[in-house]
Image (cartoon, coloured by chain):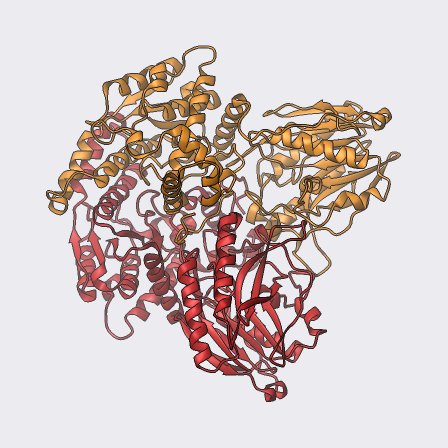
Chain colours: A red, B orange
Amino acid sequence: MKIALAQLNYHTGDFAGNTGKIIQAIGEARQAGADLVVFAELAITGYPPRDFLEFDDFIQKSEEAAKEIALHCTEIAAIVGNPSRNTTGRGKPLFNSAWFLSEGAVKQIVNKSLLPNYDVFDEYRYFEPATENSVIEYRGHRLAVTICEDIWNTGEAPLYRQFPLDGLALQHPSIVINIAASPFNYHQDLYRRQVLRENALRYHLPVVYVNHIGAQTELIFDGGSMVCDAGGNVRETLAFFSEEMKVVEVDETWLEAPPAPEVVVPGRIQDIGKVHDALVLGIRDYFRKLGFSKAILGLSGGIDSAVTMALAAEALGPENVRGVMLPSEFSSDHSIADARTLAENLGSPHDLISIEEAYQSFIHTLDPFFRDLPFGLAEENIQARTRAVLLMALSNKFGYILLNTSNKSEAAVGYGTLYGDMCGGLSVLGDVYKTEVYSLARYINRNSEVIPLSSIVKPPSAELRPGQKDSDSLPDYALLDRLLYEYIENRKGPRELEALGFDSALVARVLRMVNSNEWKRYQTPPILRVSTKAFGMGRRMPIAAKYLG
Amino acid sequence: MKIALAQLNYHTGDFAGNTGKIIQAIGEARQAGADLVVFAELAITGYPPRDFLEFDDFIQKSEEAAKEIALHCTEIAAIVGNPSRNTTGRGKPLFNSAWFLSEGAVKQIVNKSLLPNYDVFDEYRYFEPATENSVIEYRGHRLAVTICEDIWNTGEAPLYRQFPLDGLALQHPSIVINIAASPFNYHQDLYRRQVLRENALRYHLPVVYVNHIGAQTELIFDGGSMVCDAGGNVRETLAFFSEEMKVVEVDETWLEAPPAPEVVVPGRIQDIGKVHDALVLGIRDYFRKLGFSKAILGLSGGIDSAVTMALAAEALGPENVRGVMLPSEFSSDHSIADARTLAENLGSPHDLISIEEAYQSFIHTLDPFFRDLPFGLAEENIQARTRAVLLMALSNKFGYILLNTSNKSEAAVGYGTLYGDMCGGLSVLGDVYKTEVYSLARYINRNSEVIPLSSIVKPPSAELRPGQKDSDSLPDYALLDRLLYEYIENRKGPRELEALGFDSALVARVLRMVNSNEWKRYQTPPILRVSTKAFGMGRRMPIAAKYLG
């Protein structure tokens, strides 16, 4: 059987666009001699559709789209992800389904059994889990169709009581098909291969896996669709971070394949290049899907804004990224020089706007209230907020989206000014720890010095008062980032962190900083997710809690 | 059997505080001769603990607290809500449980079967649903203990396949106990009575219901704990919006009670006084639980800031609420006069700070870029953002929390400036439509004119350009609010809205405004929830979707 894997970039809620793409791919797959073409989970609606699923109009449009697509399934069949209605009268009103389209009609609907509801996932909010399903019989094959999480119930303490393929296996399938919406994080591609291998070996079947590609606000889908033989050996892989269709002949001899070696999944970033590519796609799709083409950002001369600008220049074209230097009396000369060099290296437009006049006018206006109180946080924040007002004014006047340049270490400990440097339509580095921002900078400079070396080597500073350095108020980033990783990604509590060797005073201090800044993070822009635990929809904390870890 | 209902205000994650309160209530209940004292769902942790549940340290602390509480359960038993561990090795690692404490020890643990995961609820994110439970035998009674949602699977299309009390009913219970964390919305108390009545009648049993009181950021728990006889007649009710403990003797004759009349649940606000009380509690608890006592807000002379200030004055004391008038050249004289009158009526401190100097300095700074481009949105936003910088500066310098004054109608259509008037630590009116803000104003003025009549009767205006009125760019609020209610609360799509009689051009225009402003709402403060569908954690929409309803 020849199966086409169609790995496409959908736009959530764009029924006309998604349907058109799917129909075109069906035509191309037919042309290429495929028996069957497989699309990703919830391909017709885009993933995740979130609360649009609660609107009957949205579901009706998705059904109409599926029926229109079915009309094009002649001489070829298609499996397409789409919601379907639960008509039993009990349980949630929808299923998350795979629609089997053949001979111009909807022939069968298979429903998802395991609904991920952790981290960034909310599927049990909308969908009723399936309790049983049937294989799809087609051209002499028996297809065990599963939907993403259905094959992820692995490991020693499985998250669900049910194993959907156990039931399907009793119906003697010949191929497992998995349609997925599995977002990128820096080790997801290896984890995915491990899961496919485990399923192939457990059921002695080849597995065809089709994922989304493209970003939907925070979530970046990296593609990486693939086909494994019954030994779990990868026989074909599709592109990462770009659309692709590939026709694969699933061979009978694949059933005899020897077991593939186990895949080792690392704990931290192994390939900074993938993080780079993910962020570039994340920026590009956010702008494109919102109908914008131009970005603006504040350039401090530091590494965060430099890396953000370089990524944006790659995503949008350097001519579409405008860097603005906004010096104050506390800005050092090298900051302005480094920022200018960066913009020139990229070939991007850049401006210099002093914040001095506006800042001083605030100080003057507030003088009757502040009188002779000492310079402090309020004055530092006025500088950051003055910059934000200027950047947003340019953004409003000329149609830019402001990019946020905060990194994950700062976001974690609340080292940033709300409505100041924490502004922006999109946070590019909010899921990248400071130490990883350096790795990104070195990666960006792999062929030539795009980011000035001095931005990389100088000690980080917010430059909001004379001689300020991040290290005045924060632990060393190498240490801080290790601790934050254990706390945020690995959910280690204070006793476990101390057992890992972290100093107890440091643990108490850092956890207090993280937990007392939930109110700030609540109001920050969406963050492109590249780790296993990003701030935002994947990490949901109380704001007014009295628990500091 | 004498049962004490302990309706307490917990603080999420405050193990010492919550445990202390519970132990004290056990002592008082024993003193009052109670056999059993019942506390709310997840009382020990506070509700909702959200992702703190993923930390082993947090669970360990909750277990230690429960064991400490058990030591105080002598001559009396207690039922306390607390998580418990799933030790079966399959499924999610926790249950949402009721711990039965007696004779100084943990005697039995009953787990929640139905896990709400809609609107503001995320319980399936953390908990494994129970599949079976046993009644608790105690002093000759058989207690069918259920947890909140377990008894809410009612109506013609029940949301869950399972009915937990069906299983427990086979074990011949004598009393149903329900421990709850059921947040306020303006008709929740009636809906609750209806649900209790339905369960009492279906199982012919009295129902003891204990709810939380107190606000946890967005969620306001109104209390209203109660006891019904087997006919569903309410025999005792506890206070709304305040802590209370009451001992109730559940009588054998209650089994013979005639059926209570059906409760009619209205669609919209019936009692604006309850909304008022909920908002006051919401403000008070947000400040108290974050350790703040003083609020600041911008006073425009309009109705939204006036109502916000009056509510805050009631919550925090008028001396702790500082109103700041921030006029520009476009502010009318009556605005300043109305704002001053309000502050004087309340007896609150107030200041006047002109934004003119700072605004002009921005315009001057931007002159090389804006040149002779016409005055527009950018300039309007600079005014709103200049006000925000000044308010945040005072907040930073003197330790205020800034209150946001946007209403739900504005938030819905994006009529507000991000990082400007959309700033604040807490949105007081973000779940109150403009037309309902007027009702609140009239309620606040029920005894005397606190809010100047002219703030109520004048046409709403943002006063960001000469002669501006809300009605220049928005439909009439009475019409707009009706449409928004059907779209947001009732999830009616465009075809259904037209069928309800709304003009199709208006529907298209309003839905486009709502859906194209998700990016703005993403960055706004937490909103006190008083309706059945508030912006924030209860309404999760894609930002970059291409679906305009």
Q: Position of residue A446 (x, y in %)?
A: 29, 74
Residue A118 picture quarter: bottom right
Query: At x 30% / y 51%, what residue is drawn?
Result: A469
Residue B450 in sight: yes
Q: Give the total of numbered labels.
A: 0
Q: Position of residue A147 (x, y in %)?
A: 58, 66
Q: Nearer the viewer, residue B261 or B437?
A: B261
Look at the picture and state if A314 lies above or below B534: below
Residue A280 picture quarter: bottom left
Q: Nearer the viewer, residue A545 or B195?
A: B195
Look at the picture and state if A269 lies above or below B524: below
Residue A432 in sight: no
The answer to whether A537 appears left or right of B256 in the picture is: left
Q: Nearer the viewer, residue B66 or B455?
A: B455
The answer to whether A77 appears left or right of A281 in the picture is: right
Q: Position of residue B123 (x, y in %)?
A: 61, 47
Query: At x 78% / y 36%, what residue is drawn?
Result: B202
Q: Position of residue A85 (x, y in %)?
A: 59, 55
Q: Nearer the viewer, residue B417 or B363?
A: B417
Pick out the residue farthest to the right.
B140
Q: Quadrant of the N terminus of chain A?
A: bottom right
